[in-house]
């Protein structure tokens, strides 16, 4: 006789027993319970400390002043209490911090949204549509990842100059609207996560191919799309090389503005680290907000694989 379902347990024994039963069933793999041992917790602790240490070191430098940093290259583990003063100096400096923050939000958000949409659309086409040259075209798209980005900077800058886009945010946004990795990622995910029978059923019901994509493929690609969008946002937020070349100091993004805190002959490390710390706070907030979706996407992708 099979075990009662979770809703039945909730009706008979209460919600607490139902939650406990659900946890037990989720932890069972192959009929046996797998519990993490001390080795797993040790590895996770080391990884966590290694991830937090650089951020905390930057915060310690941002909480000090130049004289203290010169005397103590390795600062004390206790903050010195000047963090908010240094942040105030950053906000009141001539690097146009608020304008750079707004530019970074616009660029990262637009790139993340459109890259997810275009990559999902291309992944749907490569994985579920049948057309001549599909495999060769996909191989060509993937092969473009072997070309270093730096080799395309000069011709890309020439194109932007011809379009009169230099110094404008559109020059940063357009080249990142779709990437070969995004197309490959969504193609591989939809290949296994989206049964072709669902598309056929929607077509039988009278839906067009675009409508099938919007109502069938896009919801199925949600876990992978969330991960791709999150990593795209982070990559765009921290991008420095191309925005520094095409935008310049007049219309900077946040990484470019932080770089402008460095003077020609003197580097105020407390001021620079305060700018760096402030610039990564939105990313930390984003990971806290989207962390559950990220974990769900990783787990669902593992189950699908």
Image (spheres, rainbow, N blue to C red):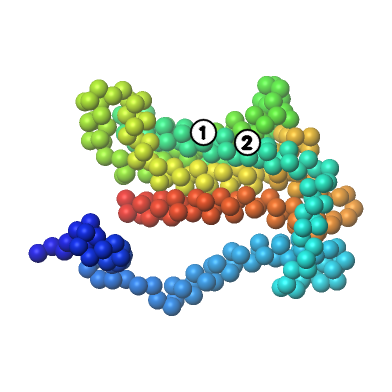
In front: label 2 or label 1:
2
Q: Which residue is mark 1?
A: 114
Query: In the displayed structure, does residue 194 sit left or right of residue 175?
Result: left
Q: Residue furthest bottom?
A: 38
Specify the label residue 91 is tagged with.
Answer: none
The answer to whether residue 155 is visible is: no
At numbered mark 2, what does the secondary structure look like: helix, strand or loop? helix
Residue closest to the eye, 163 or 67? 67
Q: Which of 152 and 197 lies nearest the eye of the viewer?
A: 197
Residue 173: x and y, percent?
A: 61, 33
Q: Is residue 49 above or below residue 199?
A: below
Instruction: Give coordinates of residue 105: x percent, y percent.
Output: 63, 40
Dot 2 or dot 1, earlier in sequence: 2
Residue at the image position 37 percent from the left and 30 percent from the top: 214
- Count of labels in the image: 2
Q: Quadrant of the N terminus?
A: bottom left
The extreme right residue here reads 265
Locate residue 26: give its quadrant: bottom left
Q: Nearer the viewer, residue 60 or 144?
A: 60
Position above or below: 68 against 182 = below
| Rendered view: 198 above or below 298 | above
* 171 is higher (above) or lower (below) than 98: above
Q: Is residue 246 visible?
A: yes
Q: What is the secondary structure assignment of the residue under circle 1?
A: helix
For label 1, count other residues whose C-alpha is less than 10 Å away and answer few (under 14), some (14-19) or many (20+).
some
**Residue, disc 2:** 106
**Is 285 situated left or right of 83 in this image?**
left
């Amino acid at each position: 006789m099979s075990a009662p379902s979770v809703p039945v347990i909730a009706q008979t024994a209460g919600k607490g027993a139902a939650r406990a039963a659900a946890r037990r069933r989720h932890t069972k793999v192959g009929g046996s319970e797998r519990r993490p041992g001390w080795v797993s917790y040790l590895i996770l602790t080391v990884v966590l400390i290694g991830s937090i240490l650089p951020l905390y070191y930057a915060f310690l430098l941002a909480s000090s002043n130049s004289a203290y940093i010169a005397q103590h290259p390795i600062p004390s583990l206790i903050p010195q209490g000047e963090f908010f003063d240094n942040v105030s100096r950053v906000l009141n400096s001539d690097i146009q911090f608020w304008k750079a923050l707004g530019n970074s939000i616009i660029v990262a958000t637009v790139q993340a949204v459109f890259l997810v949409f275009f990559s999902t659309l291309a992944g749907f086409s490569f994985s579920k549509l049948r057309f001549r040259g599909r495999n060769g075209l996909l191989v060509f798209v993937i092969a473009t990842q072997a070309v270093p980005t730096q080799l395309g900077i000069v011709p890309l800058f020439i194109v932007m100059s011809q379009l009169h886009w230099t110094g404008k945010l559109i020059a940063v946004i357009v080249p990142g609207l779709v990437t070969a990795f995004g197309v490959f990622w969504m193609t591989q995910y939809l290949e296994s996560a989206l049964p072709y029978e669902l598309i056929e059923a929607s077509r039988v019901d009278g839906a067009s191919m675009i409508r099938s994509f919007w109502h069938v493929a896009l919801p199925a690609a949600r876990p992978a799309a969330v991960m791709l969008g999150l990593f795209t946002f982070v990559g765009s937020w921290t991008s420095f090389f191309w925005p520094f070349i095409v935008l310049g100091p007049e219309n900077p993004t946040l990484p470019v503005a932080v770089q402008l805190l460095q003077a020609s002959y003197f580097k105020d490390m407390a001021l620079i680290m305060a700018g760096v710390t402030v610039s990564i706070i939105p990313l930390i907030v984003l990971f806290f907000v989207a962390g559950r979706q990220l974990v769900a996407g990783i787990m669902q992708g593992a189950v699908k694989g």
